Amino acid sequence: MSAQDSSASAPTPSKTPSMEEIVSLCRRRGFIFGSSEIYGGINGFWDYGPLGAELKRNLKSAWWEDMVLRELAGPDGTPVDIVGVDCTIIMNPKVWVASGHVGGFNDPMVDCRESKLRYRADHLMALGAVEPRARIQVFLENDADSLARAEKALLKYERRDSLDAVRHLVRPFTALSAEERAHAVGPDAKEPGTLTEPRQFNLMFETFVGAIRDEDSKAYLRPETAQGIFANFQNVLDSTRVRVPFGIAQIGKAFRNEVTPRNFTFRSREFEQAEIEFFIHPSSANEWYAFWRDQRYKWWQSIGLAGDNLTLREHGRDELAHYAKEGAGCCDVEYRFPFTAPGFGELEGVAHRSDYDLRQHAEHSGKRDKMKYFDQERSERYFPHVIEPSGGMDRGTLALLCEAYTPDATRPSGVFMKFHPRMAPVKAGIFPLVNKDGMPEMAEKLSRQLRTRWLVEFDPKQSIGKRYARMDEAGTPYCFTIDGESLKDQTVTVRHRDTQAQERIGVDRVEAWLAERLGA
RNA sequence: GCGGGCGUAGCUCAGUGGUAGAGCGUCAGCCUUCCAAGCUGAAUGUCGAGGGUUCGAGCCCCUUCGCCCGCUCCA
């Protein structure tokens, strides 16, 4: 790449962009619209416009190319084997029983009428005697302060010497009867009986398969793409020549009936995941976990999230999912969005899922040990463990938009979108400097040539400055302009988005010049 | 669900009871041999919806819908 492409030479942003400005540009330029807007919209659903659709497509294509198609060197240098699948959104509902989503992917919530706070019912513990009308203090699990407050409060209602006896009378809040709840005092309340009964918030969307709408026909929209991969584990083994260690990749929509969608497309109810389930021998979990953690972090950097706004965070033991408690670990690749700053929001999780899912499906499907993998080299039959890098493509797209948004008071548009060239929706603008004297004809010819490979924009109208400004807001990295000289010597000027600098190259070199910079 | 905020042009917003506006964008024409996003002109609104008060409502009242923020959840 030439010096003009270097981000180091770009002007310093004049201020920190707000999310409102980014949302506004997304709408104005056609990156992202609210879904069903003409009917007032629908909370938690978003549409991609012409530029947004290209941006997201570039992100997904890059992922598929880099993970599935291109050679990737594993921890020991040998190529990593990954194949793709594309599974349905609606599956046999038993899948979600096996995965634990029907039983566990819903969180009963408890509201406190006094403190106005909301708690997850399964995070609340009750302290107090199992006696009718006994005072019960509710506290937060694994929270020493909350427990201490509960004990102190309970002392006022119990004889001092009985606290020791009461102390181990700790029960989950969900075990309390309605009558007991009436005597329970919330973690941040003073009056008893202000906690509501636990209410279910099932995060899975339900639907009905077939014309009859009854319990037997109930099905779910998948809350994660992973289960389609696990359910096809044997099919892939039987129909391809992959052997452990190998991965199965999938990009697809997933649905979660979030309690509160928030922050633009960050928490949407319908979203797209790019997941790899990478199957390994249990003894190599640490090595592969570290490999994928580092690999995925580097990948996000490679598509333009290279600065301080990207970080890698290892999870603490206490925040691990049920299936990952005993594993090699779990971490998130996180991005500092304007709405999370100075904190970060998750783009991708890399988790050691152990053999949890395969075991669950072996059990629930009745396939049992037949689902085990036979390892020729080891002469061993086992359930492979899984390392799962699972990224959000909508979140990734949003991160690309936030990272690209660069205010620049010195240029007419006032802002430009500094996308990595590989991600940029429009790769090049092709302009006749003036819309006459043979220039439009030459520009159009060049445009036709480039269009066979990339999305480029031919624009002969209005002043050249206006056209550059428009391309700045679309994030188009290069503009080729045909001027009077072009007709004489067959050269064109290249205008670089990030620096506004220009250089001159032969028109016959443009395609190769672009290919080199777009990595394609 | 609870609490708070907000709904006026594609975007950002002004308009506190008396004929719906501005800037930007979009489009057309002009100009233009590299930042001219300059010049001229044009299109664009059931003022979220319904009801009420009033001679008169974008503005006041009620209802409703939607969006945003917080609690909770999460790729």
Image (cartoon, helix red, strand yellow):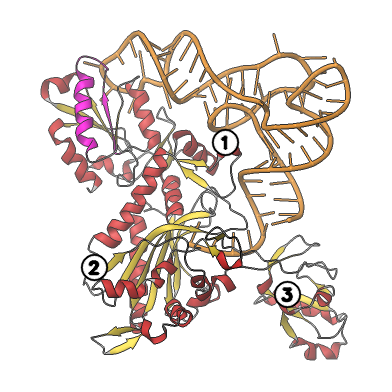
Image mark 3: chain: A
Residues in magenta? A427-452
- Give how far across and how far down residue A379 sits, in percent: 26, 90
At numbered mark 2, what does the secondary structure look like: helix, strand or loop?
loop
Label 1, residues with CA under 10 Å away: few <14, some 14-19, many ≥20: few
Sooner in the amino-acid sequence: mark 3 or mark 2: 2
- Which residue does the image show at 33% across and 65% down from the upper left? A295
Q: Which mark is residue A139?
A: 3
Tell whether A160 sits left or right of A71: right
Residue A109 position (above or below residue B55): below
The quadrant where residue A514 appears: top left
Residue located beneath label 1 in the image = A38
Q: Are marks 3 and 2 on the same chain?
A: yes
Q: Looking at the image, which residue sits at the far left?
A: A489
Q: Amino acid at mark 2?
A: Ala
Q: Amino acid at mark 3?
A: Phe
Q: Quadrant of the N terminus of chain A?
A: top left
The quadrant where residue A287 appears: bottom left
Q: Are marks 1 and 2 on the same chain?
A: yes
Tell whether A432 sits left or right of A154: left
* Residue closest to the eye, A426 or A216: A216
Q: Which mark is residue A73?
A: 2
